Structures are given as C-alpha cells and as structure tokens.
Amino acid sequence: MYKGGVEMNIYTVKTGDSLYSISQQYNVQYTKLASDNEIDASVPLIVGESLVIDTPSTKLGDIEVNGFINPNIKLDVLNKTLPYLTYLSIFSYSANVTGTLETIEDETFIRLAKAQGVAPMMVVNNRDFSSSVAHQIFNNYELQTTLLNNIVYVLESKGYYGINFDLEYIYEYDRYTYNRFLNRAVTLLRSMGYKVFTSLAPKYNESQQGLLYTAHDYRYHGNSVDRVVLMTYEWGHTYSSPRAVAPVDQVSRVLDYATTAIPPSKILMGVPNYGYDWTLPWVNDVPARAIGNTNAVNTARNVKASIEFDQESQTPHYSYYDKNKKQHVVWFEDARSIYQKLLLVNKYNIAGVSYWTINRFFKQNWVILDSMYNIVKVNI
C-alpha cells in the first residue's frame, strides 16, 4: 500500500555554499557529508549540485534490487555494491542459431555474490539482439532442446540461482512463438528449482508499435515468470536528441500500464546508472558519449558549469563548451532524480528495481536506497 514519501534531506548547492558551511547548517560532520556524496572535501562545490545530508528514521518497506554487470567490472566496485543487492545479473550468455551459448568468465562474480548473500542470475540474450537468431530458435523445437540443455548445464555447473531471458528485437509475428518457448523454458527450469526472469521493453500500452515492443507480451510474461525487469531507460540514448535517459513522467506512464498487465509484486523497474554527453548542434548519426553520474558532476565542476534541474522529467542537466569551443549538453542522474524514481516503487507497490549497470559505483544512489527501504535477501 502506498504510504506517501519519506522525507530525505537532499540539499541543492547555492552560490557561496561550502561543504563545511552546509555541515554546520545541518549539524553533520563534513567528512561524512563528503563520504556519502563521493566528494573530495578539498574541492569546491558547484551551483546546482545535490547532496544527501542525512537519512530518515523510518523506511517504506522491503525492496528487491537487481544489478546487471558486464564482465569488465572492477572487483572493488562489485564488492562495495553487493551489500545493496538481492540479485546479481551477469551479462551475458549469447544464444546462437545452433542452440549453443557463447560463454563468459563468471565464476569469480558468482563466488563473490554468494559470499555476500546475493543470488547470481544467468543472463541469456539472442546473439547481438538478432531478430533472425530469435526467430530460428523460437521456430525449431530441436534447437530449443539444444539451447535449454546448454542453459541447464551452465545453471548447474556454475551454481546460478536462476536465469534472466533478455531477448530483444523480436519480430512481431514471433510474439506467439516467443510465448510458447517461454512456457517450455519456465516449465523445465521451475521444475528444477530455478527462478525465471525476463527483461521487457518499456511499453505504454499493449498495442505499442516498433520492433522493440510488439512481441513483448506483458500479460503472458506476468502470468508465466517469477520477475519481469522493465527496461525503463534509454529515452535519451546514444543516437537520440539530448534528453533525460529515464524521465520520471515517462517511467510512470509505463508503470501505469504495466501494473494492469503484470502483478506488481513481480515487477522490477529499470534504473539507469549513467547519463549522456551530447555535442551540439545535435546530428542524428553522431553518437553521444556515455558518462557516469559522479563523473558528470566532476565534469561540471571542471568546466565551471551550473547544474539545472528539469521538473517535468525530474532529472539534472547542464551545458558547457569544450576546449574546441564546441557546446555540449549533459543529462545524468543525481540524488534528487534517484529519490524520485525510488518513490515509484512504493507508489506502485512493485517488487523493486533493476540497475543497468552497476559497473560504476554511485554512492548517493545506495545511501538513498538503503535509507528508504529494507533490501531483501533470498535463500541461496
């Protein structure tokens, strides 16, 4: 049940503020203020920067937290993040048209996850998110048998808790065959004690058009699997015009629909752990540069940019000029935007969140999440 918000002290830096003056104002040690916000106590603050000051005494309830990783994650980042996770989804085993899997080096990640009580999840995708690869698998029973046998071998030999099928860009006419494959996979894997998750595109309604959306059947997945990860990000993306990656108003639209088709207790809402830096004037085929949230603030500090906050999307952004006098615009996540996203878990009474990815450590996010919710751990 929706309980309203929790009052978080998130302070927006004004002209003349310093870490010391803010710490005095709120009666908190400036070293703790620096640590909670990943700030070097010796560097100046910038106008518009957001700081987590302290935490509420009460929490909203329980939350499940999934974090995707790529195999190039630094182990110190992983170890600092694991205490905040329920599931660790290791990206990714790629399924080929022969039903074989392109494997990854994942043993260390599985071991570290289990050592901190986190359930490791195997992730399987259609190689390079190929529509053709998915089509051939969905329409060939023998290929499915080979693929499922290979999946079971990995699950058993590596000691995974379950699997996340991240099958994307499926042909519209393969919607039924995807559902049929999913039914077969769930029936087999659940009988063996494994949990089954799927990752789905962010839809506003069931009839939403586009290769990313049409074959993702919210109601069928909601009835079939244990958890559904909604990929509620990439409104702003590498080749889009500059905008927020996960605008709260658009994420809410997805949840408005998703919670009518999928049991809320099965939904993990996607949260991006990154932003983008676009060069202006924007050109359609020129890619934006992905940027970490902490790095985005450090860049603003280096170029002496003031950070602004867009009320509609509840997302920070700023502009600057580089050394070649090219203008840039950066959209990213900060304490304020993360807080607003995490409130949606309580508002819609969903199971939790899923971060893409946790390869960069973003301290503010974890301080806020841990302050708002009790993080669920499962029996592994």
Image (cartoon, grey):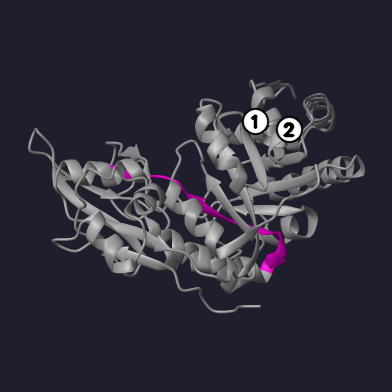
Quadrant housing the C terminus: top right
Q: What residue type is labelled 2?
A: Ile
Q: Is residue 39 magenta?
A: no
| Residue 268 % position (x, y) | 63, 56
Left or right side of 28 for 90? right
Compare residues 266 and 53 and report the one nearer the observer.
53
Distance in Å between CA atoms under marks 2 and 1: 6 Å
Q: How many residues crowd mark 2 within 10 Å: few (<14), some (14–19), many (20+)?
A: many
Check if mark 2's residue and mark 1's residue have beta carbons within 8 Å: yes
Give the farthest residue toward the right: 191
Could you tell me which secondary element the residue under label 1 belongs to?
Answer: helix
Question: What residue would you read off at disc 2?
Answer: 137
Q: Magenta region: which residues?
A: 261-277
Please identify the quarter of the rendering in which residue 135 is found: top right
Q: Which residue is drawn at 32% across and 45% down?
A: 39
Q: Which mark is residue 133?
A: 1
Q: In this view, does 194 lie above or below 305?
A: above
Left or right side of 306 for 222? right
Left or right side of 183 for 235? left
Q: Which amino acid does label 1 sit on?
A: Val
Compare residues 357 and 109 and report the one nearer the observer.
109
Please identify the quarter of the rendering in which residue 256 is found: bottom right
Residue 262 visible in rendering: no
Q: Is residue 271 magenta?
A: yes
Residue 6 visible in rendering: yes
